[in-house]
Amino acid sequence: MPDFTRYAGFSTGRAARRAGPPAVHGGRATSAAAATVLLVPPRSRPASPEPALPDVEVRRSRRRTRTVTAFRENGRLVVAIPDRFTRVQEREWVRRMVAKVESSEQRRRPSDEQLAARAAELSRRYLGGQARPTSITWSSRQGRRWGSCTVTEGTIRISTRVQGMPGWVLDYVLLHELAHLLCAGHGPAFWALLGGYPHLDRARGFLEGVAHATDMPPDADGEGELDGAGDGDPEGAGDAGAPEVGLD
């Protein structure tokens, strides 16, 4: 963004009047008799509504002078900018960085097919290949859940909110739902199925932190509303009364 203070002055003297009206190039007016440049906002173009942005936290830093960075923190997008930025500059750079991060995540984001292949490998490695879902898909309709499993249908849905989280968190969510195909409850037998996953406690702690940061109500397992049963199918597939368990 240009420094608007550079364009604060312009000539109004006799030489400038003799030079005629300033020429306009790309929204900037220049005069042959004036060494300064005046930014002229377009008057005829109606203002278009700004596109809605996702939940973004903007952090200003006095030590940051020339760089802008963006990163995910507990599933939330953080944009770090210099403290001297104006609100106009802030909005512009937030838009740029959101687009950049989303484009990068889209390239890395696994498809439903890749998700199914990842789940098959996790089942083979940690569950002896016994968990065999009929389908695994991403879902933006999971509400507060990280994932859900309709046991009678053998279908698993993973919340799109997990996209962008570390791979070992996604693997835990997948394993959790895969284990429900073998054990619907959350007793010792269920957790024994997940006991071989080396990042179990770390992943559960990560999700608990995200739930706390986003004001999700904790459940008995402390990971947000971790698991429930008998809520029907949030995607509208299968029988309305199909028993379902979900990771929230």
Image (cartoon, helix red, strand yellow):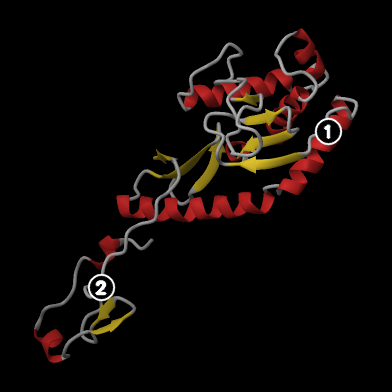
Q: Secondary structure at mark 1?
A: loop
Please tell me how crowded label 2 is: few (under 14), some (14-19), or many (20+) other residues with Cα within 10 Å.
few
Would residue 116 be found to the left or right of residue 97 on screen? right
- Earlier along the polypeptide chain: callout 2 or callout 1? 2
**The C terminus - image quarter:** top right
Given residues 27 and 188, the one toward you in this image is 188
- Vertical order, 18 against 222 (above or below): below
- Vertical order, 28 against 81 (above or below): below
Q: Residue at x 31, y 50 (%)?
A: 87
Given residues 206 and 34, the one toward you in this image is 206
- Looking at the image, the residue that sits furthest to the top is 188
Amino acid type, mark 1? Arg
Q: Residue at x 67, y 24 (%)?
A: 203
- Vertical order, 113 against 127 (above or below): below
Amino acid type, mark 2? Pro
Q: Position of residue 84 (x, y in %)?
A: 34, 47
Q: Quickly name the residue at label 2.
A: 42
Q: Position of residue 68 (x, y in %)?
A: 48, 49
Would you identify the image quadrant in which residue 181 lies?
top right
Would residue 121 be found to the left or right of residue 96 on screen? right
Q: Residue at x 56, y 51 (%)?
A: 102
Would residue 166 be found to the left or right of residue 88 on screen? right
Q: Quickly name the residue at label 1.
A: 132
Please tell me how crowded label 1 is: few (under 14), some (14-19), or many (20+) other residues with Cα within 10 Å.
some
Given residues 236 and 195, the one toward you in this image is 236
2 and 1 marks in contact (CB < 8 Å): no
Q: CA distance from mark 2 to mark 1?
A: 60 Å
Q: Position of residue 159 (x, y in %)?
A: 61, 36
